[in-house]
Amino acid sequence: MHEMGIANSVLEAVRTEMGLHPGTYPCKVGVRIGELAAIDQDALRFCFEAIIRETDLESLELGIEVCPRRHRCQVCAYDFVVRDYDSRCPRCSGLESTCLGGDELELAYLEVEEYGASTAGTKSTQ
Amino acid sequence: MERVPLERKVLNENDRIAAELRNRFQEHGILCLNLISSPGSGKTSLLERTLEALPRQDRVAVLTGDIQTENDANRLKRFHFPVKQITTGGTCHLDARMIERHLADWRLEDLDLLLIENVGNLVCPSSYDLGEAAKVVVLSVTEGEDKPLKYPSIFFKSDLLVLNKIDLLPYVPFDVNAAADNARRVHPGMEIVKVSCMTRDGLCEWMQWLDRRRGTHKPLLQETAS
């Protein structure tokens, strides 16, 4: 259960990034989580909501993109998604493949809005 | 509304410290291993057998992590190598900053093997890079042979699976081949050694793996040892 630490790191990154965008407030932060990253989405969402509650970032939304495990066949160079841990190449049945992705734990983007822009649920003061 | 690309790791700060540690280990020719397992699989026992088998003059140190107590460090100090306990006070994994802090008063030039025993947990430690050259996962035969499928991340990220407590195989319904197959489904080509820290069966295979890794890490050591 390290999702609380992960949620804190996401929030810290948002605060750091916000220093570069004066006059705006953050609406949504996007993260990419690979299926091999050992992160439970629901737990991360729960922790994230718990730590922003009653803070200036209470309306911040968390966007989670789940990344599948992708491999490249070393025999025929075919890229494929690994399902059910079967890393055999679906094209040539080659057994040797290298992992291209699936253990992501990355910050993807931050959506910011200028103060005073007319959007529901915004705050006028920080 | 504006979308700003961030494109960096969530654990950027941990990864930065881990990269610094890895550089320092490489500079000093230190092989650092991160041992991970569920609680009770035998990480500390494996370290006891390892320290007992290493020559006294070997330049080895151990960091051992737990949520509470100095028990593991006390068990490992008997072998006269430098050992330090990291008590996390509740955190379920070690992170790079804890390693950096606990290494502060050791001279890295005096070491060439650093063994880190992580907190007993198959999930969270897999997300935190400690600057190690390799992760080693320990699985005992009193656990299920489907553990690699249930906790794929750590089996995927570990270079070696140490299957421990093989002396208990006559008494438990554990299928060694199925466990190996499951590990290799998650991590094709994964190296596996089978050991018993009680009877010492298989330990020389583990020590050979360790020697091999130390050899590739510091070629000079291999030459003088042979």
Image: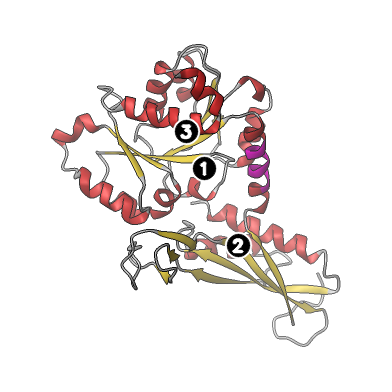
Q: Visible in this render: residue B112?
A: yes
For disc 1, the neighbor class at 10 Å (few under 14, some 14 to 19, many from 20) is: many
Q: Nearer the viewer, residue A28 or A125?
A: A28
Closer to the eye: label 1 or 3: 3
Q: Tag 3's secondary structure?
A: helix
Closer to the eye: label 1 or 2: 2
Report the quarter where the N terminus of chain B lies.
bottom right
Q: Nearer the viewer, residue B121 or A81?
A: A81
Report the residue marked by disc 1: B93
Q: Nearer the viewer, residue B19 or B121?
A: B19
Q: Are marks 1 and 3 on the same chain?
A: yes
Report the residue marked by disc 2: A106
Q: Tag 2's secondary structure?
A: strand
**Looking at the picture, which amino acid does disc 2 mark?**
Glu
Q: Which residues are magenta?
A: B16-23
The coloring applied to the image is: secondary structure
Q: Position of residue B92 (x, y in %)?
A: 50, 43
Q: Kindly give the residue lying farthest to the left in the view shown.
A: B170
**Looking at the picture, which amino acid does disc 1 mark?**
His
Q: Which mark is residue B213?
A: 3
